[in-house]
Image (cartoon, rainbow, N blue to C red):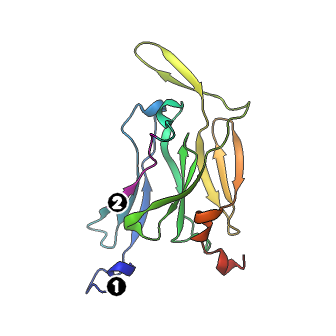
Amino acid sequence: MPDWAGNASGRVRDLVLLVSKSLRNECQEVGQRIFMVDVADPSRPFLVPTFEVPESPGRFCSRGGCFGPHTLNESFTPVYYRRVAFIACFNAGVRAVDVRDPFNQRETGFYIPAMTPRTDKRCVKTRCADRSKVAIQTKNVEVDDRGYIYVVDRAGAGLHILELTGRARAITNFAGKGN
């Protein structure tokens, strides 16, 4: 940890990124988060600040389907390792998170797939009536050593192959790959 370099102890941290999975459509549960956990002392793990996708700008709770994290890809490929983690967030798409400073994680990019004619409905049961909405549901994210990002939607919107641009790409290690 660069900011801890002058400390007598604790300069080296061992961190794990965890996802609490969203399970219910339209935010019918406690909001789920992405957690960074310091496990340098396995007998005394502690939480580092969490990361969450804000609901309000995208109105994700009212879009239909689940909103919140599902899976993550914290890749060991040198392009992204210790720099960017990717989180699949159901109807909020995939999020690129700068993890270089685990105590100040920041979103550096995102991609929300468009619905297609094959995208299916997600239903919610309420006390008054059942309702359904067509909604994308980004479920899995994977990367390869060339830097491509593969995003899969479980609601029929398909497979998307992405490449980082802008601010998100600037923090990667593409320079070390000859790109």
- Residue drawn where x is 61% and y is 53% of the image: 141
Instruction: Characterize the local packing of mark 2: few (<14), some (14-19) or many (20 or more) Cα atoms within 10 angstroms.
Output: few
Residue identifier under label 1? 5
The answer for how far apart the CA atoms under marks 1 and 2 are is 20 Å
Q: Look at label 2 and name its amino acid.
A: Pro
- Residue drawn where x is 47% and y is 13% of the image: 129
Q: Earlier in the sequence, mark 1 or mark 2?
A: 1
Magenta span of residues: 48-56
- Residue drawn where x is 52% and y is 19% of the image: 131
Residue in front for this viewpoint, 107 or 78: 107
Q: Is residue 177 left or right of residue 45?
A: right
The answer to whether 121 is drawn above or below residue 92 in the figure is above
Residue 152 at x, y percent in the picture = 65, 46
Instruction: Answer whether labels 1 and 2 touch (C-beta < 8 Å).
Output: no
SS type, badge 2: strand
- Residue drawn where x is 54% and y is 43% of the image: 92
Residue identifier under label 2? 49
Q: Look at label 1 and name its amino acid.
A: Ala
Residue 22 at x, y percent in the picture = 45, 41
Residue 17 at x, y percent in the picture = 44, 61
SS type, badge 1: loop
